[in-house]
Image (cartoon, rainbow, N blue to C red):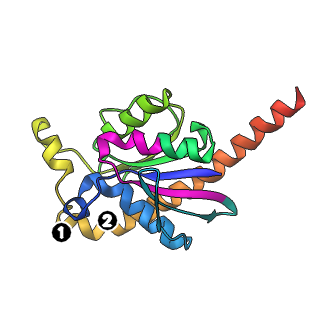
Amino acid sequence: MFLIIGLGNPGPRYELTRHNIGYLVIDNLAEKHRIPLADHKHQALLGEGEIEGLPVMVAKPMTYMNRSGQAVKALLSALEIFPEQIIVVHDEIDLPLGKIKIKTKGGDAGQLGVRSITERLGTDHFSRVRVGIDRPENQADIEDYVLTPFSEEETSALNEVVEEAVCKVEKTLLEMNERYHQKTEENEEC
């Protein structure tokens, strides 16, 4: 089982803000693979299904961004899986809108949801799909910036960005599965 989590803030006030791009990606991923996000457990809205033939749990933490680690830790415990079996999808101000990068470990670069997860799990060894939302011109405006909706101009490109991010999640999932099975086979040989 793999866990795919999209970070954001719950509630209609934050629905289409930059900080909620992780939620947008998860909604599209779940819709594409017909995984209903219908269960509300472990501080998250979640659904179980398959992607590329692999069993997955798709989730959106219902905690605020800076407390995402609470839901992730609860889900990890409930599913009895390891951090290496998690993909976290989140916004990234250090990347321009439309740019997406994969990261498998390392620092949080100031992303408070990722920081919360790292602190709660006690490790940074989980995969991340970092979706660029761009950076405001004034550094002091970051908090307000991430909580603002995308501009009309940006919204036209947003669908393509979300679709590309869904593809990156699928690709990352397949790569994680391959690594996981290689590790299992190596352990069996000992």
The residue where tag 1 is placed is 152
Q: Residue 26: where, in percent of width, then height?
A: 44, 61
Residue extending furthest toward the right: 189
The question of residue 61 being in magenta is answered with yes
As drawn, the label of residue 36 is: none
- Relative to 55, say whether 32 is above or below: below
Residue at left 21%, top 44%?
Answer: 135
Mark 2 Cα shell of 10 Å, populated few (<14), some (14-19), many (≥20)? some
Q: Are marks 2 and 1 in contact (CB under 8 Å)?
A: no
Q: Give the magenta part as a residue range.
A: 55-72
Residue at left 56%, top 57%?
Answer: 57
The question of residue 62 being in magenta is answered with yes
Does any portion of residue 151 appear in the rendered image? yes
Residue at left 31%, top 65%?
Answer: 158
The residue where tag 2 is placed is 158
Dot 2 or dot 1: first in sequence order is 1
